[in-house]
Image (cartoon, rainbow, N blue to C red):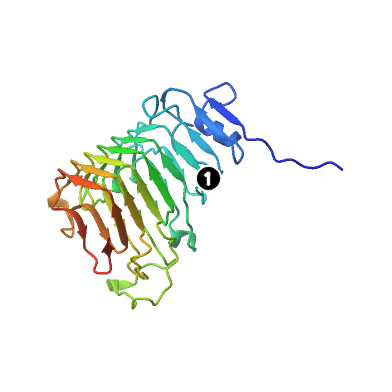
Amino acid sequence: MLLAHPALATTLEVPTASYPTIQAGIDAANDGDTVFVDPGTYTGDGNRDISFNGKAITVQGSGAGLTILDLQGTVEDFHQAFIFDHEEGASSVLQGFTITHGFADLGGAISIGTDPILAGRIVTTGPAISQCVFENNRATTYGGAIFMVNANVTVSQCVFKQNRAVIQEGLEGSSYGGAIAFQAYLSTSPPPSGGALPPLGSVPAQIPSNAVRLVNDVFTGNEAGSDGAALDITGDTTTFDPDPTSPLVYIDNCAFNGNLCDFDGGSDGATGTIDFYGGNVKMSNTIMYGDATLSEISNFFPRSTAV
């Protein structure tokens, strides 16, 4: 009797004749494979707006100082590096790149997750991102470098510098999270008119504990037009049951320095380096200094907690 054996993991090298772009390598990969990207600067189609397509693979550069994704995004021509919207999990790994010159509405360099109102269900997406540098990316509304919704993500050993969440020139509006913006929704329904909130405990929490983990990361020189010079964290403000033992965001051994909020643009005055509006944040072994904000941490929603 013949026994089936699992396929061995394969490393697919980019660029080659078979895999000229990163997306070509991903398209050919199977779960467990590694797409290894050689040193160089990568531009154009196939090397931006990349999708893992839900695969449990590792996409690995040769190191942030060697493998650069220059997205060449502009206000007229939006481009991101990666779009994670196929319910990727922790076995979908991105590491070892510098990502620069991304431009989008939500997440200048990377967007993670699916809007539950559009999907009609709660969707959790959770890749692992490590050893990357995010530099000079821009979003017009949320997340100069990364935007996440209902994410279960670990971002470790990354550097975020000079990313911006700033509204387009000549337009009115607000922008949040110079480096990262995270939103957690427990409902597939739009918020009720008037912003009325249900009683605490009326809806069970569905977001996983420690949904976003930031570990050994550096945030420097990032800018938000409104709130959250480095990080903007929004818990569900329509069906939210805060639990201090299960933070939405866990920050460990990180450093924040020289991040900036545009005070005049702040819609609610909550112009902190880290701003959270609903949700729980746990911080440990983290330093914050030299930021041009009204406060290092701003908490504008009474059901928020920081530990």
Quadrant of the snapshot with the N terminus = top right
Please indicate whether residue 8 sits to the left or right of residue 211 in the image: right
Q: Is disc 1 surrounded by few (<14), some (14 to 19) or many (20+) residues within 10 Å?
A: some
Spot occupied by residue 90 in the image (x, y as percentages of width and height): 50, 48
Q: Is residue 212 above or below residue 35?
A: below
Q: Is residue 218 above or below residue 205?
A: above
Q: Residue at x 16, y 45 (%)?
A: 291
Please indicate whether residue 289 sits to the left or right of residue 13 in the image: left
Whether residue 75 appears in this view of the structure is: no
Circle 1 is placed at which residue position? Answer: 91
Observer-nearest residue: 168 or 293?
Answer: 293
Question: Which picture quadrant has residue 31?
Answer: top right
Question: Which picture quadrant has residue 137?
Answer: top left
Observer-nearest residue: 254 or 85?
Answer: 254
Spot occupied by residue 135 in the image (x, y as percentages of width and height): 30, 34
Seen as rendered, the residue at the extreme front is: 285
Whether residue 266 appears in this view of the structure is: yes
Q: Secondary structure at mark 1?
A: loop
Q: Residue at x 47, y 38 (%)?
A: 50
Q: Residue at x 32, y 67 (%)?
A: 237
Spot occupied by residue 138 in the image (x, y as percentages of width and height): 29, 40
Question: Which picture quadrant has residue 235?
Answer: bottom left
The number of numbered badges drawn on the structure is 1
Quadrant of the snapshot with the C terminus = bottom left
Q: Is residue 44 above or below residue 195?
A: above
Under mark 1, the amino acid is Ser
Q: Residue at x 44, y 52 (%)?
A: 113
